[in-house]
Amino acid sequence: MVFRDEGGCVLDDRLTRQAKQQAKDAIQGLMQRACDEINSHIEALEQIHHATPSPDWRAAYEPQPYDEPKPVRPLPRKCGMLDRLLSSRRAEVEKENAEAEAAYNASLLLWNRHRQEHEAREVARKAIIEERVLTELPAMEIVLEESLMDIVWPRETALSSEIRDHGRVVMIDVDLPEIEDLPRKTAAVPARGYKLSIKELPVTRHQQLYMRHVHGIGFRIVGEVFFVLPKAEEVVLSGYTQRPDKATGEVQDQYVYSVRVNRRDFADINFANLKAIDPVEALGRFDIRREIARGGLLKTIAPFEEPAAS
């Protein structure tokens, strides 16, 4: 930790010692916040599945408020003594007030039109979420796309979906990160001193983080599908990454795991205790194609192209 004055200049040793003595608690608090910020990136990757909804729940319509501020009627400008004496000055004030009132009325008219359009969209959205999603494929596609886009991923995550069999089956392809994309540094506040301890994750711990993250992504998506699509009974999710082809050297999309999950079996998981769940083991309970190489990395596989036989 480097101590500087208000101008950005480094403090000399005497002032640095004085700052440490007078603001010890504040400095340690600052170090702890910096430490937590570094470690939070790893925690977010490893705990992505903690927010997975239970398949026994159903997504509810949540009204979106109309947040455009309502126009405020302007206060009319009052005529001063000189304005009252001179008709031209009085006419100027009256014209200014009339123009301000006209502008207000136009703004209010536009505001009301936008509010009515918003309310109409909300009525349509409510019908999609509560009724049409049960029977209409386009409504299912809208609800699924919006819900997956609303997930806040710790790293950019791209995916595509296809709804089949009148909504009973959902096929998902998700672009997973490679292990090189994940952070490797952790931080700790020392018991003594004013220098954060920054360390590289051990190789095995980094591989464990990667496995938990890429499987946590799949776990979260499967849960989201069942949550927003009440008619869905099976999710076929396949994860791929970009790797160089061993024959050509060209970078290609290569699948690393593919899993078929039935709603009924997914509901057997204790969603009240997701902190105890290892997503690698959790997805392994289902019909999964996955080859884990020595060292914990995923080999290329051929994904499922069809749902399980009904």
Image: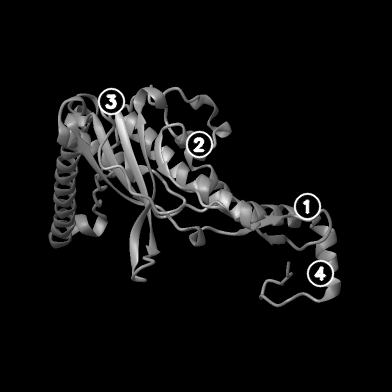
Q: Earlier in the sequence, mark 4 or mark 3?
A: 4
Distance from Cα at disc 4 to Cα at disc 3? 62 Å
On screen, residue 152 versus residue 29, left or right, reads left
Taking depth in this image into account, of 269 and 68 the one nearest to the observer is: 269
Taking depth in this image into account, of 214 and 65 the one nearest to the observer is: 214
Mark 3 lies on residue = 230
Residue 114's x, y, as percent?
18, 43
Q: Amino acid at mark 1?
A: Asp
Q: Secondary structure at mark 1?
A: helix
- The quarter of the image holding the N terminus is bottom right
Taking depth in this image into account, of 242 and 6 the one nearest to the observer is: 242
Residue drawn 54% across the image and 33% down it: 277
Residue drawn 62% across the image and 53% down it: 204
Residue 41's x, y, as percent?
55, 53
Taking depth in this image into account, of 245 and 31 the one nearest to the observer is: 245
Mark 2 lies on residue = 50
Q: Earlier in the sequence, mark 4 or mark 2?
A: 4
State the mark number for residue 25: 1
